[in-house]
Image (cartoon, grey):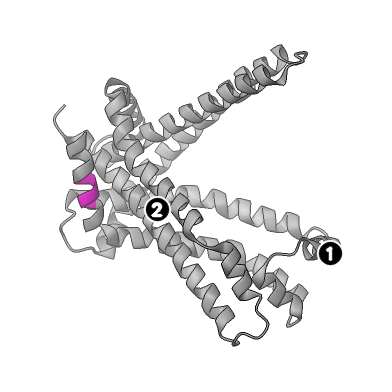
Amino acid sequence: MGAALRSGFRTAFRTRSAVWVLLLVNLGVAALAALPIYRGILGSTGSSLMGQTIARAFPRDWLVDFSINSPGSLDRYAGVITLLGLLTIPINSILAAGVIGRFRAPASTFSLREFYRDTTVYAWRFLRLMAIGLVCYWLWFLAVNQGLGGFVRWVTRDWLDDRPVFWMRLGVDLLLLVGLVFVNLVMDFARVKLVLDDGSSAVEAFLASLGFSLGRFWKAVSVYAIPSLCGVALLGVYRLLVPWPLISRYLAELHAPRWHEPLTLALLFLGQQLVTFGRYWFRVATWASEWSFFSGPR
């Protein structure tokens, strides 16, 4: 397990060019999702002082007025964001094929042609695997949240003490989360097997990954969880270290130079994208560690 993690982090460092592909593609999709919102806010505020106010802090009063003066706009924006959010699922499934394909020769020079070749070769199998995973997510959610959760709500409907009700419902939620994480773990190893064993089908890869994950449960969980938790920790460090009150006060200064506001926002955006890049890097490190662990001695 330790050797797999060390190899995974080394491989992720060598294949960091592929991380840029993940970042830029997802950033492009996010820009498409934000474009109608930006145009709506720009059309509502124009060159007024409200535009500067929104840049410093988001006023709820303006949002209420906007929803009244532009009926249906928020629902349309929500529909666009939901559609593009769903679109990122197959996009990232296909991009994962290009990233994992790099693990065959991580020391070689990165080539967009090779990345594109891997995505096209494995695209349909990765999409079929994505469909299998979505069905598993749905079945687990249905069984735990609707089935077990509904049973707990029915049993505790007349209880007067809220504390045991809270703990029972919290247990259901934790069970739901653990199951979803395990399905994600199985899907990761299935992606690795599809590329490692080129002749495998999506169903074969999923079943083989399920057996592998159950047979080496704790080691498989550790190889999956340690790089993933590093990505979560990076987001937590960002939230703790970025001085949001100081930034808000700095943006609210009336007599500051005109360039300080766009420069502050640009630096903030750059910092956020660096954090996002780091989280994608840890995601690639997770796949690389799983590749090393799955392809190692059985």
Residue receiving disc 2: 279
From the viewer's perspective, is 107 left or right of 253?
left
Q: Position of residue 55 (x, y in %)?
A: 65, 72
Q: Is residue 167 visible?
A: yes
93 and 228: which one is in front?
228
Q: Which image quarter is the C terminus in?
A: top left
Judged from the image, the secondary structure of the residue bearing numbered disc 1 is helix
Mark 1: few/some/many CA within 10 Å (<14, 14-19, 20+): few
Q: Position of residue 194 (x, y in %)?
A: 29, 39
126 and 145: which one is in front?
145
Q: Position of residue 296 (x, y in %)?
A: 16, 34
Residue receiving disc 1: 65
Q: Tell me where the magenta segment starts and ends, as one range.
A: 7-11
What amino acid does circle 1 point to? Asp
Q: Compared with residue 249, is residue 94 higher up or lower down, i.e. above or below?
A: above
Who's the residue at 33% across and 35% down the image? 190
Who's the residue at 43% across and 61% down the image? 25
What amino acid does circle 2 point to? Arg
Q: Position of residue 240 (x, y in %)?
A: 49, 54
Main secondary structure of the magenta stretch: helix
Query: Mark 1 or mark 2, which has the lower sequence index?
Result: 1
Is residue 263 magenta-colored? Answer: no
Dividing the picture into quadrants, the one containing residue 52 is bottom right
From the viewer's perspective, is 135 left or right of 93?
right
Q: Compared with residue 282, is residue 206 higher up or lower down, i.e. above or below?
A: above
